[in-house]
Amino acid sequence: MKIKTLQDLENVRKAGIKKLFPDKPRIAVGLATCGIAAGGQDVYEALETALKKKGVNAFLTKTGCFGICNEEPLVNIAMPGKPLVILHKVQKEDAESIAEKVAKGKLPEEKALCKIEEWDHITSEKPFFYGKGYENIPLWNEIPYFKPQKKVVLRDAGIINPEDIEEYIAVGGYSAVYKALTKMTPDEVVEEVKKSGLRGRGGAGFPTGLKWEFTKKEKSDVKYVICNADEGDPGAYMNRNEMESDPHMVIEGMIIGAYAIGASEGFIYVRAEYPLAIERLKLAIKQAKEYGLLGEHIFGTEFSFDIRIATGAGAFVCGEETALIASIEGKPGRPRPRPPFPAQKGLWEKPTNINNVETWCNIAPIIKKGGEWFSRIGIERNTGTKVFSLVGKVNKVGLVEVPLGTTINEIVCHIGGCGIKSKEIKAVQTGGPSGGCIPRNLFDTPIDYDHLKEVGSIMGSGGLVVMDEDTCMVDTAKYFLSFTVDESCGKCVPCREGLKRMYDILEKITDGRGTEEDLGILDELAHTIKATSLCGLGQTAPNPVITTIKYFKDEYMEHIKNKVCPARVCRALIDYFIVPDKCKGCTICAKNCPVGAIDGGPGLIHIIDQSKCIACGTCMDVCPFDAVVKLSGEKIDTPDKPIPVKKGR
């Protein structure tokens, strides 16, 4: 049906509510990429079979990611009048048991992670109430992972079916578009966004409302809006999840933005490595057109707007606005000097407004609830929430949405549960390969655009990579620099040549060939490249090196002066030894050594020939007795040749 009036929207909303709150059990399996990777599709199919086999009258559907990725596969079950219960680490073998219990009006409470009694969908008129019950199951916002969080962008992720427009409308979807198009002028929309204080969530943090205003003021017969979904930071997957779990919120934000600046066409630029996001975006656009929410005369007004998807080939540099524009135009994705800015001359030389996925996701709540409401979240000059992907050496990985100004410690230790296996956390990398490494003693730093800049890092798109005592900071700087060297478009000399020279020096240091003079050259190069590169990639690529030299210079000096890697990571500086008292003579290590560096037969204490060893670590990985140790700058006494293992050991 075509939605033209508020009553039409209300009718679709009622149809969606019947799906969210059916008169029978609703079972929803988390099928974002993280859920599928953990076995969610197998769980879905097993549940489908079990429910049919046992004749259970239940509504089986799919949902997106609820954020706590390390607990996947997740399954949500809502019994009529009862709380929505989220089951975690569900396996396909659990399907029959779940079906049997649901048939009896019960739940497998031993699999329950948490429950939701009331849910504020932000854009709906009032919170949704599921029901009371299940006293032994904690509320979702009482468990440590979720307690400090505030869901604005992820308001419906993991709750609604991302492939069903009616469910999106049920929770208030497209009501912000109706309000903007029928009750507000374009100027009023821009002012509301300015009032909110929303800054671009793509990394630079430029005020969104101001950016819109610049584009709006440009005189042109054609204007464009673009969603930058070219998320490329290692370890970052916020935008992917937002598109997979709630694609309509991206579309709704873009419609409002297009109305505000006077654009009639939009593009979503997505990297091809996100096939599920692309599939769900295409479906969402198709549904929006079928319901009259994209196309001609939206809500019966004079405003018309359409969206197309453009796929990128995975070039990191295409996250830069002008390179992205060039890619859409069919040209090589290389940045160009600014000015002119895209707001003046962008796509096909026309005024263009570009925001990233998360920025567009914030627009509907701002229009629905007001800029002042949004500005009260977060801190001064850094309003609203930010979604982070918390990954690395941390107990609980997943997506975290917190008010800006929340400290690093709150996210890493309170939400993430600190280090794995009680390992001491050493640092966190924010902003991906363009960000900086922040040491543990600065974890009281609030995460926002300004405070991160003060400590030498950036927000980036929102990746948080946690590192512990087993992480070598010199090797980490080399890893991120290798990424930016590979991803440089090669257009400007500082980035093309300078980054490669920096990488060569880092390789020299991690190989134990570095000098103090090299360290000085490295630091000088970093600051020169930062000051002279053409685009944001080159200007920020030295950040990991600058911050690791600043905060972890002692590790550099250990590599240079003592030829030691304290974290025992750099291959050229580590040796593997077999501890004689632990070796059982089982021969497993010798059989698995790829270069034949281990001498010894059955019942003999084995010895590693250091002249042949390539420090691959295979022997340590396969030894069932923990008899292999990894050392840097140290040695242990071993026999000159294999000798028999003492009897009784």
Image: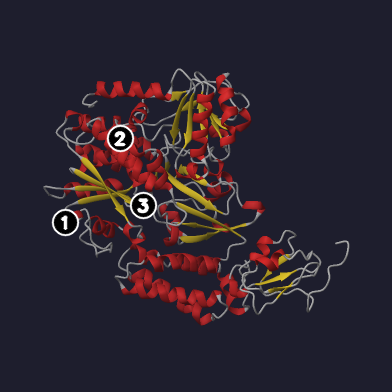
Which-is-in-front pick, marks 2 and 1? 1
Q: Residues under labels 3 and 2: Cα distance?
A: 20 Å
On screen, residue 638 versus residue 141, left or right, reads right
Amino acid type at mark 3: Gly
**Residue that badge 1 annotates:** 349
Residue extending farthest right: 648
Q: Earlier in the sequence, mark 3 or mark 2?
A: 3
**Residue that badge 2 annotates:** 367
Q: Is residue 5 above or below residue 452?
A: above
Q: Residues under labels 2 and 1: Cα distance?
A: 30 Å
Q: Is residue 471 above or below residue 461?
A: below
| Residue 527 position in % (x across, y down) | 40, 71
Q: Earlier in the sequence, mark 3 or mark 1?
A: 3
Q: At x 25% / y 64%, what residue is drawn?
A: 336
| Residue 400 position in % (x across, y down) | 48, 44
Q: At x 65% / y 69%, what residue is drawn?
A: 593
- Asked which quadrant contains residue 626, the reply is bottom right
Amino acid type at mark 1: Glu
Give the secondary structure at mark 3.
loop
- Asked which quadrant contains residue 473, the reply is bottom right
Q: Is residue 530 above or below residue 191?
A: below
Residue situated in front as seen by the camera: 421 or 556: 421
**Residue that badge 3 annotates:** 202
Q: Residues under labels 3 and 1: Cα distance?
A: 23 Å
Which-is-in-front pick, marks 3 and 1? 1
Do tag 2 and tag 1 residues touch (Cβ < 8 Å)?
no
Crowd rating for badge 1 (residues with CA inside 10 Å; few <14, some 14–19, many 20+): some
Q: Where is the N terminus found, in terms of image quarters?
A: top left
Give the secondary structure at mark 1.
helix
